[in-house]
Image: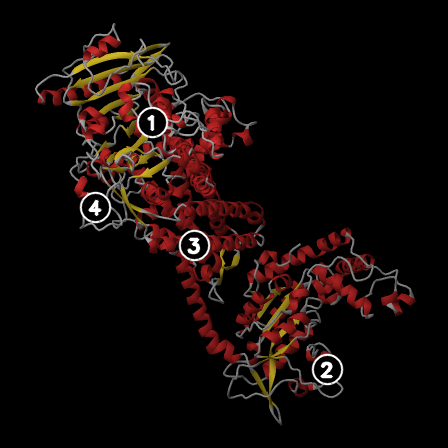
Amino acid sequence: MAANGQTPFAGANGAAEEKQKRNPGEEATPLLSASASLPTMKRNTSSAMFDCAQFHEDRTWAGFPSNTPVTFGEGETVKIRYPTKYNWTMRFLIAAHFITGLVYIVWLTMEMMSPSTKVFMYLIGPMFLVAEALSFITRVVCFVQYFTKQQKAICPLYKLEPAFPESEWPVVQFCVTHYREPVHETYQTLKNLIDMDYPMHKLEINILDDGFFDCKNGVYSVSRVGQEMTDMIRALVSRIARGHGSAHVENAYDCPSIRRPEAAPQGSRVVEFKHESLPTVRQIGRRRAKESHFKGGNLNNAIFNVLDSEQFQYYAFLDCDMAPTPDFLQLSMSQFFKLDAATNKWIPNWEVGMTQAPQCFNNLAETNGDDDPLFQQTDVYWRRTMAHLDHWGLVHYYGTNVVMFKPALEDILGWQYGVLSEDTPTGANLTSMGWKALYIDQEIATGMVKDTVVDTLSQRKRWAIGNIMWGLLKSRNYLRCLLTNDFANPPFYDEYLERETAAMAGESMPIPNKCLALAGARMSGNDDFSPEDALPQEESLLAESPGSRDVGYELRNKRASSGWNRFMWGWSYWHVTWSNPINGYWFVAYVAAAMYMLLETFFAKDIVELNVLYPAIHFAVTTTILFVIGPQSTMWRGCQDRFAFAWVRLMAIFDSCEKAMKEVKAAPWNSSAYMELMAPPIVIFLSVFGLWSYSFANCALDYQTCVEDVSSNSYVSAKIPTQVMGLFLGAVILVSMFPLFRCSMSNIMGYPMYKFRVLPGGATIPYFLAVAPVLILGSMYMLMVVSDSASTSTTSYSSQICVASESSQNLAPSVFVLGCSKCATTSLYQDMTTHMPQIDAGTHLGSNESSVMEKDKHFFDEEDVYSQGWSWYTSRYSNCSTDEDDGTVGADFTETYLESGAMTARKMKADYAQVAPSHGEEAYLKLKFVVMLRDPVDRLFSYYQSAKADNTLDIEGCDLSTKCEEDLSSCTTLTFDSWAYDQVERASACEKADSSADLWPSCGDTGLFGGLYSQQIEEYLTFFNASQIAVVPMEAYTSDAPQLLDNLASWLGLDFVRNGMTEAADLSTSEVTSAGSDEMASSTRSMLGSFYEPYVKDLYDVISRTDITFIDIISLQDIFRR
């Protein structure tokens, strides 16, 4: 309202005299020179402006034939089609993504629990796991929005059937927001608005010039930019007016802030330009307070203070650089009306609160490059996502290219305060109240993208800060102790939450503006609706009353309280709110993991055995979803966005928390932008590139060493050095960050962002990373095929050893399970003979021989057995032929071969060296040795219980009574703790007596000394190649016996058959108490752990520095889990 309480303008074409009546002290003379010229167009304004001729009949609609005009029936404002094949494909992929994602997270958790180093286990591994879990949740929330897509063709206003007379079209207020941007950016927007295909007297244009005033010491004066804007408007309007044969009328007046004083405490200045043949043009400049409420304050001031009139119910909003097409309103406004069946007239649709069109840009190619390296177009969000949310009426508000219904704005109390970006929260508030937000899938306005990296990063930071601040505000009940009082209680927020709560309960409160109530809004949410409630008091408006009724009240209530609608609303805006901090954290975890792996170039290299089936399938599904959504180039740029703008997100997290949790002084958004936003990503890129280059060069110069451990024994698993994994992860980072890096370098050197473009084909080459899961599986397939091919021709065929005697030819064992004792070798024997049908365990027993001989032959470690000769030994096995290999191999499972002393390995080598070469290869080179190992402390306790029970316990060095020595099983004075202490004392005495000799076997080969695995394996390495030995941890066997047996069979070149349960199901790897009363004290376990610790490290060293095969489902450093 004006200062004297009257309406500032009587209509779209009111006379200048009306202005003077409203402001008696104002003269209807120009504020500034009327001779101002049109602005000079700057470099970053494209000469290839949007083709404004393409509208009406020339429009084509996605999903509708392009060569056939879309026809609309009576009462139809849209035609909607659902791409059935696409929707069902997406639903299947979304479900598959969720299921495979859960499996992937479980798999990743298990992998992180068995890391390669403690650094990875306690720091990087958990950090990466949390990041992937959060990223998975974000993807699920994002993809659910794509559950249903609809394709829509819109009928323009002038084509509606029955005809919608222009005289009944509503007045539309166009509001163009501006804050100190170059004035020339607004010129084309204003010119296109004046040429809008809409009745001139029904259209008014308002430039909301938030930089109109400078304020110094409480004194307001017109700013330079404000004056330039006035000059530009005057020059453009004057030129067009002269073409109509008369001059325009210009007036200026002050408008107080009646309804929303917080937006402009000292009112606003309005400069108005009018001509009978042109729409009214205004420049509105508010006198901002110290707390300006940003763009939301500018909009609230214009709508509720300056333009607050009963006849203005529709407002269109544009950024200053967004030049609309002529049919902007033709397509947008038809969505706000529906045909009244009773009167057969078009009336306002009180369910629709907003329409939103996508953003597109005319200078993208000439400033950024046609490959859009910094994802400025954000097509996947502004087009693909919104086309899906349109089905639910939950389209997001972008801040521009939008039309709003005034009652909807009144319902949500205007634009959201308290956050930097007002658009997303305001749109969320509107749809949360049950209003529909619809999508216009056409380019009906075109603007300009930022043409420098710094400007782009600053803009992204502002967006991220706004969304994060909104998330913090929504969580204020949980964060109240951290947030400042001003942030937690922005103006009108509590009032809005009260209204939202009522709407969610299905009891929406009446729209709060009295004028709107008179114009037809329901007086009370509990009253029955009647025509009288909708009638305005002024007689002149009675004719419009049927179309002013709030007939959408019940449907809005239903939408606001609908569980499914609130679910989609919540998921959609959860993604917008929290994706920025999650992606920022994910980037930190990803880079940390890659850098850690690359740093292993300087240290001992680890090898990780991974079953990559689960992550490969999951990311293959994810990639497929992205490709189905399309377009592919845009989707790839969207993936790069996670890396390119990660640092901006991290800074936004910091700044958001700072603004929300402490009092800070306002600062320009581009302050120190070069050092704060652009320099850090360059440093990160160069750091990763330097380390990656060094690691790659190191690997290339010693290629054999670098990749010698890369192998695969199945289609889905592989052994990969962490350095190689680091090279892959580093390559992903470099390829993803390179667009930002090369654009930054271009700007630093004074060139446009596209200057250093490398890939002329756009993002074609980086697509290899998108299909990485397929490439990885293919690589493992090739590795496995090569390995299988080799094993089929040599390993598998030559594993059989036949020994000819006087009467027959029999198998000789070529597989030895050496032990250790008390390491579940009996269970392993039963499983291997059951699930590996090619194994012959030598079960042919002679007369009076115990069945124990089926497993434990003791041929090489007991002299009385060895003396019976090879004929006796091989007679336990099947007959065979030296000419043909039927695939059967002999196996000896004597568990004491490992600990029984040096003579066992020596005998094996000597005896097999005398066996005639079999199938062209020396027999002793065909032997395979499997060593099952267990935590030495647990093994020792198990040995003690068993040996004490059968009186075979090694009691050398123990001070026992004669009775106890004769019957150890009943000796109550002998406990494990005392016996273990005596064993350690004995070892200490042996070491003091001869420090140069190994404890095993010089001091003993059973008991405590049976757990010195490294020394025992070293003995076999004296006589055999390391490639002939495989180490199997008992912990892996008991946790996943089928997988381990499958891996072991692959190494042996045998078949694995899953026929029934395994014997490992009931085993326990860690024993604390016996079946009786004997227990191991924690101090004893600690003592034994300290004793064995150096020997365990020696074992790791032996395995890592030799070609010993480590067969497992976990990584090497977790061979014994404690």
Is label 2 in a helix, a strand or a loop?
helix
Q: Earlier in the sequence, mark 2 or mark 3?
A: 3
Q: Residue at x 18, y 50 (%)?
A: 68
**Is residue 202 depicted above or below 163 in this figure?**
above
Determine the CA span between mark 1 and mark 3: 45 Å
- Place residue 393 in its image quadrant: top left
Residue furthest out toward the left: 245
Instruction: Please give the residue where the numbered disc 4 appears in the rendered image.
Output: 71
Image disc number at residue 619: 3
Image disc number at residue 406: 1
Q: Earlier in the sequence, mark 2 or mark 1?
A: 1
Q: Earlier in the sequence, mark 4 or mark 3?
A: 4
Asked if labels 3 and 2 touch by Cβ distance under 8 angstroms, the answer is no
Q: Earlier in the sequence, mark 2 or mark 4?
A: 4
Determine the CA span between mark 2 and mark 3: 58 Å
Image disc number at residue 441: none
Q: Judge left or right: residue 291 versus residue 885.
A: left
Asked if labels 4 and 1 touch by Cβ distance under 8 angstroms, the answer is no
